[in-house]
Image (cartoon, rainbow, N blue to C red):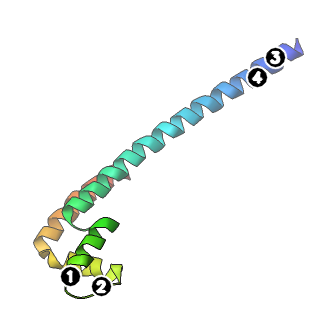
Amino acid sequence: RLEAHQREFFHRVDADVARAKAYVQGAVSALEAQVGDWQAAAIVAGILFTPDQLEEISAQLPFPMDDQQALVEWLIGLHPAEKRRAASSGLLEKYSALA
């Protein structure tokens, strides 16, 4: 009788752990998708650059640019402030959905 209760208890624990694991995996997958959308929107807005984009841009410059951070800041500065604000607004909306 005690063994049956122990088996039932551990079966419930296993089932609960499996449900919790599935829930967490689903939440992580949804969050990854939202972060991916956010990153894609930032790339389209011109305020996030992929390493390949930075390499391609660096190769086109008539001067060497070894500091990627400086290159990113320079590229962001090329966009008019109004355009940056509009892009930032859209990104803030996406961020609010994440948070």
Amino acid at pointer 1 = Leu
> Is 27 on the left or on the right of 89, as rendered?
right
Between circles 4 and 1, the one closer to the viewer is 1
Q: Residues within 10 Å of mark 1 (few under 14, many from 20)?
A: few
- State the residue at coordinates (25%, 61%): 43
- Dot 3 corresponds to which residue? 5
Residue at (19, 79) in percent of width and height: 77
Disc marking residue 52: none
Q: Quick one: label 3, few (<14), some, or many (20+) residues within 10 Å?
A: few
Q: Which amino acid lies under the numbered mark 4 shown in the image of this protein?
A: Phe
Mark 3 or 1, which is nearer the eye? 1
> For the residues marked 4 and 1, what is the alpha-carbon distance in whole angstroms?
67 Å
Q: Earlier in the sequence, mark 3 or mark 1?
A: 3
Q: Circle 4 is placed at which residue position? A: 9
The local crowd at label 2, few if under 14, some if 14 to 19, many if 20 or more residues have their Cα within 10 Å, is some
- The amino acid type found where label 2 is placed reads Met
**Numbered disc 1: secondary structure:** loop
Q: Secondary structure at mark 4?
A: helix
Q: Front-most of 21 and 58?
A: 58
The reply to whether the C-beta atoms of the residues labelled 2 and 1 are less than 8 Å apart is yes
User: Pointer 1: what residue?
Assistant: 61
Determine the residue positioned at 20% across, 77% down. 60
Most distant residue in the top direction: 1
From where the camera sits, is residue 49 visible?
Answer: no
Residue placed under numbered mark 2 in the picture:
65
In space, the residues marked 4 and 3 are separated at their CA atoms by 6 Å
Tell me the element at label 2: loop
Q: Position of residue 57 (x, y in %)?
A: 23, 74
Question: Residue 8 sits in which quadrant?
Answer: top right
Work out how far the residue at label 4 is from the one at label 2, CA to CA, in angstroms.
Answer: 64 Å
How far, Cα to Cα, is label 2 from label 1?
Answer: 8 Å
Taking the image as shown, residue 52 lies to the left or right of residue 86, namely right
